[in-house]
Image (cartoon, rainbow, N blue to C red):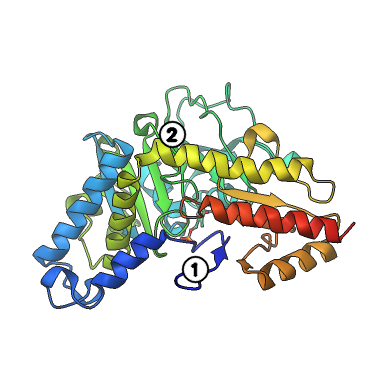
C-alpha cells in the first residue's frame, strides 16, 4: 500500500476515499492559484463562494434534490439538530418519534425540552435489534412531524421501508447512511446528516429542508443562529462556516458522481455488507443479533460467545491492521462500520481475518 494506511472500521470520523485525500493534499499549499489553502481563505471571497456553490450543486445532482428544498450547511455537528428540529418545526408543540436505538433516544430526550413528544413505536423491548412496524401508527392530528433515525449507527439497524406518516412531514436523521444509497428527497420534509460518518470531516451537518417549512415566527427563545431560515437567507454564510468541511464534502460528492452516483454506491454497499453478514450467519463462533430484514448496510454489530473473547478479537484485529472494531459500550461486542469509502477488499480482508480467528478459538 502506497501510504501504509490501514482499514479503519470506525463509526465516525471514518475513512474518506483515498483519491479525495490525494486531491486535497495536492491543493493544500496553493488552491487553484489562489496562493493559499482553503483553510486560510476568506469565506467571503469569490474563490470560496465558488467552492460552496459547487458543493451544493454536486449534492443536488447526486441526490436529485428538487428546487423546492433548501440545502444548508450548519455547524454543531449532528447533535445540534436534535434541538434545531423541534425548535423550528414544532408549531403545535406536538411531535411523534420512533425509538429505534441510541440516536433516536438522544433526539427524543432533547425534543422533550421543547414540547410534547409522543413515542409512537419502539424496539426497546428487544434491545433495539429490529425496526418496529410503522405501517399504521397512532399519529395525533395535531402532530407537527414524525421523526426517525433512519440508520442507527450504534445498534446497526435501518429502515427497509419508510413509516406511513399519515400526511405528516417526515424528518430523518440520515447521518450514518447519507449518500450510501438513492434517496427520494420528496418523501421527507427535512433530512439532516452529520458529515463525519459517510462524507467528510466532523463538525458540520447538512440539512435538506422543504422551503415552506422555513419560518419567521419562531418563539423568541430560539437563538437567531438556530433558525433554519437564518441559514437559508444567508446562503449558509450567516457567520463563518466550516469552510474546510464544505470543501471536503464537495470533493466527496464529485467523487461519487464520477464513480456512478448513488445507485452504484448502493450496489457496492449491498455486496460489501452481504460478505460480512453471510460470514457471520454461517459462523459458529460469531453472531449478529439484528433481524435480517432490518440490518444496516453501514454499521454491523456482532458478538463472540463472551465479552472476554470480544476483547481478545478486537486486540488481535488491531495488531493485524483492522482498527476500531470495538463495539459501542452500550451494545458491547464488536462493530464494523463499512461506509462508502471502505473498499470491498477491506471487508474481504476482515472476513478472512475473522475466519482465521474463529478457527483459532475452536
Ligand atoms: C454520529 C451521529 C450523530 C451525532 O453526530 P455528532 O456530529 O457527533 O454530533 C447523530 N445521529 C447519528 C445517527 C449519528 O450516527
Label 1 to label 2: alpha-carbon separation: 44 Å
Judged from the image, the secondary structure of the residue bearing numbered disc 2 is: strand
Mark 1 beta carbon near ligand 1 (under 8 Å): no
Q: Is residue 93 visible?
A: no
What residue did someone put label 2 on?
Answer: 170
296 and 316: which one is in front?
316
Is residue 34 depicted above or below 281 in this figure?
below
Q: Are marks 1 and 2 in contact (CB under 8 Å)?
A: no
Q: Residue 220 versus residue 191: which sits nearer the camera?
A: 191
Task: Tell me which residue sits at (20%, 57%) in the image.
Answer: 52
Quadrant containing the C terminus is bottom right
Question: SS class of the residue under badge 1?
Answer: loop
User: Against 43, is 287 above or below?
Assistant: above
Q: Nearer the viewer, residue 120 or 148?
A: 148
Q: Residues within 10 Å of mark 1 (few under 14, many from 20)?
A: few
From the viewer's perspective, is the residue at label 1 or at label 2 nearer?
1
- Counting from the top left corner in percent of width and height, residue 330 is at 70, 58
Q: Dot 2: within a 10 Å radius of its alpha carbon, few (fewer than 14), some, or many (20 or more) residues?
A: many
Q: Quadrant of residue 203?
A: bottom left
Q: Between disc 1 and disc 2, whose residue precedes?
A: 1
Residue 269 at x, y = what percent? 51, 43
Q: Residue furthest right?
A: 362
Q: Which mark is on residue 292?
A: none
What is the count of numbered marks? 2
- In the image, taking residue 93 as reference, residue 349 lies left or right, namely right
Q: Which residue is at the front of the view, 10 or 88?
A: 10
Query: For the point 35% across and 47% down, which residue is it?
Result: 256
Image coordinates for residue 323, horizontal then vertical, percent = 61, 67
Q: Which residue is mark 1?
A: 1
Amino acid at each position: 500500500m502506497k501510504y501504509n494506511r490501514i482499514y479503519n472500521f470506525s463509526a465516525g470520523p471514518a475513512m474518506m476515499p483515498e483519491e479525495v485525500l490525494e486531491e486535497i493534499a495536492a491543493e493544500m499549499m496553493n488552491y487553484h492559484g489562489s496562493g493559499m489553502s482553503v483553510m486560510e481563505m476568506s469565506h467571503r471571497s469569490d474563490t470560496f463562494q465558488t467552492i460552496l456553490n459547487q458543493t451544493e450543486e454536486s449534492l443536488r445532482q447526486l441526490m436529485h434534490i428538487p428546487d423546492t428544498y433548501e440545502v444548508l450547511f450548519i455547524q454543531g455537528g449532528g447533535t445540534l439538530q436534535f434541538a434545531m428540529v423541534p425548535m423550528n418545526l414544532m408549531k403545535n408543540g406536538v411531535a411523534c418519534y420512533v425509538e429505534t436505538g441510541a440516536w433516536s433516544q438522544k433526539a427524543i430526550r432533547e425534543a422533550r425540552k421543547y414540547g410534547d413528544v409522543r413515542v409512537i413505536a419502539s424496539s426497546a423491548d428487544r434491545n433495539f435489534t429490529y425496526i418496529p412496524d410503522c405501517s399504521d401508527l397512532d399519529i395525533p392530528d395535531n402532530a407537527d412531524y414524525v421523526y426517525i433515525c433512519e440508520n442507527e449507527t450504534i445498534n446497526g439497524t435501518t429502515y427497509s421501508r419508510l413509516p406511513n406518516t399519515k400526511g405528516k412531514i417526515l424528518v430523518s436523521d440520515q447521518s450514518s447512511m447519507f449518500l450510501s444509497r438513492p434517496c427520494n428527497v420528496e418523501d421527507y420534509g427535512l433530512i439532516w446528516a452529520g458529515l463525519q460518518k459517510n462524507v467528510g470531516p466532523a463538525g458540520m451537518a447538512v440539512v435538506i429542508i422543504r422551503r415552506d417549512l422555513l419560518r419567521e415566527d419562531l418563539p423568541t427563545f430560539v437563538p437567531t443562529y438556530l433558525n433554519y431560515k437564518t441559514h437559508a437567507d444567508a446562503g449558509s454564510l450567516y457567520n463563518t462556516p466550516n469552510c474546510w468541511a464544505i470543501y471536503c464534502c464537495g470533493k466527496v460528492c464529485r467523487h461519487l458522481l464520477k464513480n456512478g452516483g448513488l445507485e452504484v454506491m448502493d450496489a457496492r454497499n449491498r455486496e460489501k455488507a452481504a460478505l460480512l453478514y453471510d460470514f457471520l450467519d454461517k459462523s459458529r463462533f460469531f453472531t449478529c443479533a439484528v433481524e435480517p430484514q432490518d440490518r444496516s448496510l453501514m454499521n454491523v454489530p456482532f458478538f463472540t460467545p463472551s465479552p472476554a473473547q470480544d476483547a481478545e478479537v478486537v486486540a488481535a484485529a488491531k495488531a493485524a491492521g483492522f482498527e476500531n472494531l470495538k463495539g459501542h459500550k452500550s451494545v458491547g461486542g464488536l462493530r464494523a462500520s463499512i461506509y462508502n469509502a471502505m473498499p470491498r477488499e477491506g471487508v474481504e480482508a476482515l472476513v478472512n481475518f475473522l475466519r482465521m480467528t474463529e478457527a483459532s478459538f475452536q
